[in-house]
Amino acid sequence: MQIFDAIIVGAGQAGPPLAARLTGAGMTVALVERKHVGGTCVNVGCTPTKTLVASARVAHVARRTADYGVVLQAGPVIDMVRVRARAIGVAADSRSKVQAWLDGMPGLTLIRGHARFAGPNRLQVGEKEISAKRIFLNVGARPSRPDMLGSQDVPMLTSSTILDLDHVPEHLAVIGGSYIGLEFAQMFRRFGAQVTVIERSDRLIAREDPEISDAIRAILEAEGIQVHTGADCTSFAPHPDGISANVTCVKGAPDVVATDVLMAVGRTPNNDDLDLKAAGITPDAQGHIPVNDRLEAVTPGIWALGDCNGRGAFTHTAFNDYEIVAANLLDGADRKVSDRIPAYALYIDPPLGRVGLTEAQARAAGHAILLASRPMTRVGRAVERGETQGLMKAVVDAATGRILGAAILGIEGDEAIHGILNMMNAGASYLTLQWAVPIHPTVSELIPTLMGDLKPE
């Protein structure tokens, strides 16, 4: 048995930086990875998908050049082989940089293979057994594949395998109207596919407030994407033209016939093949490893970071998990997950930037609230760029003046939201933001005006 000071399982977003901090503190560290370093984000998540989103936006803008007085003789031609090659290249470059970082890290042993617990502080990796007093699980998640009627009888794409397509589907049916599904839906519509989104809930991205969901649906439908919500009885069957998808149990209702189907209904944590029982850990009902506010599992000496712990499903939350653990272990800090203000983005175009509570969540939490909303048609930058879809919204606690949450659905919304996020992290009153003097013309310049519009619910 080889003994280390610490073992990290998974070279995703939290693994390499944690390894750097631990080795920098003089520890011997084993980092176990069974596939590619860099994890989901670098290999099949943020990096390749946002590269594809960029290509899709170029195609979209090329079709609109006449709106800006720039006349092209012909529309864009999509070379999907080159589009895919660009995404693969960007991902490979990112992965190689992570690999080079790890290769040059003193005190680190990179072990390739599948790790399983052989005891609370022991892991089996192939024929090798390793041990440490500190074990950090950063094993990520994978696309879920629910057992819908007929789904085993037809080919299904996932958010990972769809990246292998070197052609544009004739008709792509996207099962799931949430963040991942909608990004691929718009992307492939802009590449030239007919696209249909099938969502079980009554509206898209149901965790958002209704006006945000409605605006997103309008954006997608304006580009020719068909949307079916309330699809409570989805099933599949082979069809001469591809795959038939039922969206309702109503007898005689029409089916959606597509050449390709993308299953985008969530992600499953990669905890089911770790032999967690041998470590005294029982996953929760969703398969996540339960952790406390310091990301410690029930068994002393084991931590869970990133998607596998159910405390955040984003690259930035995984990285923050690393920051919390490293600060507590090495800096004598007392950082907690519950101190984190949730924030994320939906990368359709225009994007949605979200932070904190929605209006519905604030009401459910018992806050007396102030609300404000402004359409992007009143934002100079959006008008000048000819991209006025969407709105911005703020939710404030009426008693304290603290900002509870905000959404910016519109051009550069994923960047502009950080002005509000930073104020929330500082614990400042909305009045501080209201009296700021932003730069003109920007999207952010409307945020103080938005704060000035706040009124009781």
Image (spheres, helix red, strand yellow):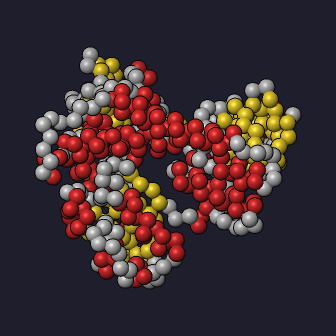
Q: Is residue 209 visible?
A: no
Residue 229, quarter of picture:
top left
Which residue is rendered at x = 24% and y = 61% of the image? 382
Which residue is rendered at x = 31% and y = 80% of the image? 452
Q: Nearer the viewer, residue 190 or 87?
A: 87
Q: Is residue 347 visible?
A: yes
Is residue 143 placed above or below 64 in the rendered structure? above
Q: Nearer the viewer, residue 204 or 186?
A: 186
Is residue 43 placed above or below 450 in the rendered structure? above
- Residue 387 in the image: x percent, y percent? 23, 56
Q: Is residue 38 left or right of residue 24?
A: left
Count of marks overlaid on the render? 0
Q: Is residue 276 left or right of residue 2?
A: left
Which residue is rendered at x = 68% and y = 42% of the image? 102
Is residue 344 placed above or below 280 in the rendered structure? below
Q: Quadrant of the N terminus?
A: top right
- Residue 353 in the image: x percent, y percent? 39, 59
Residue 414, quarter of picture:
bottom left
Q: Quadrant of the C terminus?
A: bottom left
- Residue 174 in the image: x percent, y percent? 34, 36
